Image: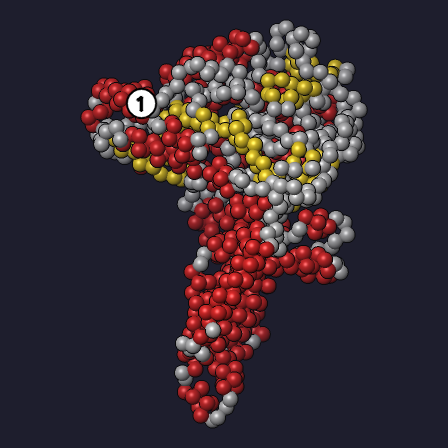
Amino acid sequence: MKNRALALTLALLVGVLAIGTGARGAGAPVKNPDTFVSLVYGDPESLDPAYAYDTASEGIIYPNVYETLIGYDGSVLSRYQPVLATQVPTLTNGLISKDGLTYTFPIRKGVHFQDGSVMTPEDVRYSMLRFMLQDRDGGPSWLLLTPLLGTDSTRSKEKIVVTYAQAARSVTVQGDTVVFHLNHPYGAFLSIVAAWTFVLPKAWAAAHGDWDGTEASWQKFNNPKLQDRYEFDHMNGTGPFKLQQWDRQAKEIILVRNDQYWRKPARLARVIIRNVAEFTNRRLQLQQGDADAIAVDRPDQSKVEGMAGVTIHDGLPTLVVQVLHFNFKIDPNGNPDIGSGKLDGNGIPPDFFSDVHVRRGFAYAFDYAAYIRDGYRGKADEPNGPIINGLLGYDPTAPKYTHDPAKAAAEFKEAWGGKLWDTGFKFTTTYNTGNVSRQVGAAILKDSIEALNPKFKVDVRNMQWSTFLQNTNTHKGTLYALGWVVDYPDPDDFAQPFLASNGDYPKRNSYSNPQADTLVKQGAETTDPAKRVAIYKQLTKLAYNDVPGLYVAQPVGFAVMRSWVHGWYYNAVYGGIDYYPIYKE
Amino acid sequence: MTTFILRRLLLLPLVAVGVSALIFLLLQFLTPAMRASLYIHDPKQLNALPDLIRKYHLDQPVYVQYWAWLIQVAHGDLGWSETAREPVAAAIRGYFPATLELAIYSFGWILVFGIWLGTQSAVHKDRFLDQVSRFTSISGASLPTFVWGLLLLMIFYGHFGWFPPGRLSLSGDLYVRGGAFHPYTGLMTIDALLNGNLGLFWDAAKHLVLPVATLTYYLTAVLVRITRSSMLETLRTDYVRTARAKGLGEHVVVDKHARRNALIPVITLGSLLFVGLLSGVVITETVFNYPGIGQWGVNASQQLDIPAVTGFALIFAGLLVISNLFADVMYAIVDPRIRLQ
């Protein structure tokens, strides 16, 4: 009796599973044809274009709601097209001055903001000044401050050091044009304009408690807290979509079509960007057609491959680099990661990595191919320096380190006056908890090094993001993993943070090379592309010789979406998707 | 009893101060740089760390920070949650109803199944029903929630497309965000009925099926075990034997004499389970993308979002006090020998 009941239950279950599959395969009717549902993970920080400096926020802001003076030509980052300006400045059309210090943008007429007001050159100027002068800690203001005012912050030791007059002089309105006056020639300026010159209406901002554009009040609006700005959760751009709601409980952004858009209105009526932390949930919604595009990590790619009605766009070139950093001057105080703190086989001295033979030893020992295979399922390239593929000045012929244990051993035998090979060393390498590719990299580093010499010991420790930050910030990191994502597609955005002695990583790791400083400065200030190429090639060579870090991977991106999505294109700078050309069919 | 209840309620502010002070004290073990990590999302922002510490006064002594927070709370402001991107009070108001709705529906089933199955299991000890009940409770307690939840999601959404994740379908979601809907309680099923929209009610109910089923299975298992052992103990007592000797029917013995007394530990556990449900069921909320308070609480803790963690703890310390009070009152009702003092 019991067996019969069991058999009946099983048969019923199998039967039901066999009959009813709700999955939507190829050829299935399009679900919600005028609405695009994108499932991501990660909340936006702010919708204020002068505050946001994270991928999740940027994906909403640009180019969907706020627009810039010029933009990229689809996927092509080296070509620009006019957006809110009517022409792209060049030396040929005379809109860039011969000395490279003045850029003139004729402003498009008849463009309406989403509240119905008409965009004026004064709105453009106000938006640029606001972007610079708001300058919150850790925000994006430096991107315009550096070329226009020659400083990366409006403050020094909490005191405001920039005057309104300085800022006002740097952006002026002349008739129907807006003119940018650079502090020094800056070859990357147009690429910054293409990604960071968002325009919002001055009157609307001031009416909602923001800066009114006057000299008298600007300091009050400097360095705000997140919640202090109306624009934090309200938007009023000129783009093809406008914000309907940011539901922070449902972790959902709803954009609706801007029917007053200055170009032909978008084909999609609505875009929903929802944060869904759990991958299986995202995958099932894609499978059911309830989602049109989902975020997928490389290790999960196999779970969406072969899914009916789903397309994977693979092989997308990213402007991201993963690096293992050497700390040249480790803080030994209360630092368990350097063991004894001496070169006695049970630790490392604080200046352990200042010996170039040590760094080269590591560079030859690391198994790059294994890292790319295991950490990125083979979908990454090994860069040959900080100037990665896709940037001006990338040199595919430049040498790069390869896994070569014999050369590694030879370098280590020369290190520390020839003592290191006999004494050995022991230290702990660190990465932030949850980052799988960095975890794989640390394990490969350990295996590669320990296989060379039984006296070489590398321990691996993961840390919560907060602890990890504290560790690197206080110079306690030894050899640690951290990466870099593009701000604007120019080699200066990579050369400066990795090689200039005042760059983000050299400051942290006490790396300094006067020649690198000179070249980084020259590269930034030179406007002739051919000369810049030569400079960045030199910097690539310098990074190879100096080895301030190991440039271990430039990941290849991929995007997963329903096959009924058309018009999508990839742009390495966008934080998300350009929904304007998209339609479902 | 009224005095007892009032006295317990008057304890609430003291509990709140104690809990918040404890949290502030514990957080002092973290360095200012670690606490400032809340505002750093990218290596590009690393250089701003010292400025952020000064801006948010993270290098101030603990008593200064605590006093500033107390003054702020006295003005009805629980602070800003960086993880929720809104004021702590607004976050609690927003997340709590969703969790409450999930908790109410789950708790009803948990009580019904848990007490009935536990009782039947004890009454029919070592027989088929007992074996089924024990198997259910062991598997429910040992199968991780995320496995059970994902399994249900894959079968009933991925395969059949019946019960989707989230709180509402796209059309329901858009209707709720339109001007016609009024959120009276924040409980979607109730609000749907109050708005006279049966379609929306079914939509919301459909989205509750899988998370409620997951929680019910998992937590019923715990309640079954407690009810069963408590019932077994009670059924062995002299007064139950006497009741049977008097010739009372088995259902009278079980339902009227034994179960009532066996419910004392069940009430204790039940009140704790309910508070547990209200404080968020993180894994279930995550698996089903259900926008409850648990996900936010965990996220805030992981990112050292101090105002959020403190606000969260305050609310649930209060709920715990109230639930204990409720349990005390229930003891007295179930067993009149217990007097509240």
Residue B232 in the image: state x and y as whole percent.
42, 78
Viewer can see residue B228: no
Q: Is residue A28 left or right of residue A548?
A: right
Q: Is residue A141 left or right of residue B262?
A: right
Residue A446 in the image: state x and y as whole percent.
31, 33
Q: Chain of mark 1?
A: A
* Amino acid at pointer 1: Asp
Residue A322 in the image: state x and y as whole percent.
45, 28
Residue linked to disc 1 = A404
Decide which of B190, A364 is in the foreground and name it.
A364
Residue at image coords 52%, 66%: A8
- Answer with the quarter of the image where residue A164 lies: top right
**Mark 1: few, some, or many residues within 10 Å (few <14, many ≥20)?**
some
A203, above or below B29, in the image:
above
A372, above or below B266, in the image:
above
Viewer can see residue A186: yes
